[in-house]
Amino acid sequence: MTGDDNPARREAIANQLICCEMGLEAAHDGWIGWLWDFCKAKKRLPSAIEAQHLKTETINRDRKLRELLDAKVVEPKQVEGFQTLGSSLGPATTRKVINAIEARRKRLADRVFAWADGSMKEAAE
């Protein structure tokens, strides 16, 4: 495995890349998870067009999750973009997914906010 293929190295790169103005915007607007995933995969920040796509993906995913939560039981094939191991998603499973997404967003946003406050600026440079 080369250094570029090492998952831990890619995560470290993504953690550094999100500590910037775009990361602050993403943290405030809720698309920080998509930004981090992009940075991990591409080892760079997205262009303006790519960033807009990430924002749109976040809006769409959040809308789909709200639809899942409003439905009592939804067959996975009815919700594009979501895969499950079970035969259906119920409200409890959907709530767990939403909670996991929100917890991840908070962890990533906390990293960016710490950088913005100056406590991590040296580490990101």
Image (cartoon, rainbow, N blue to C red):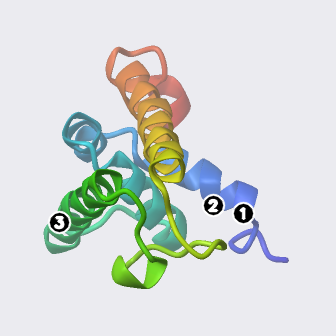
Q: Is residue 52 above or below residue 118?
A: below
| Amino acid type, label 2 | Arg
Total labels: the figure holds 3
1 vs 3, front mark = 3
Q: Residues within 10 Å of mark 3 (few under 14, many from 20)?
A: few
Residue farthest to the front, as pictured:
72
Query: Residue shown at 58%/72% (left/top)?
Result: 84
Q: Which residue is mark 3?
A: 56
Q: Which mark is residue 10?
A: 2
Q: Confirm or deny contact between disc 1 and disc 2 (CB under 8 A).
A: yes
| Amino acid type, label 3 | Thr
Q: Which residue is mark 1?
A: 7
| Amino acid type, label 1 | Pro
Q: Position of residue 24 (x, y in %)?
A: 26, 36
Residue 13 makes an appearance in the image: yes
Q: Position of residue 78 (x, y in %)?
A: 35, 81
Mark pair 1, 3: CA separation = 26 Å
Mark pair 3, 2: CA separation = 24 Å
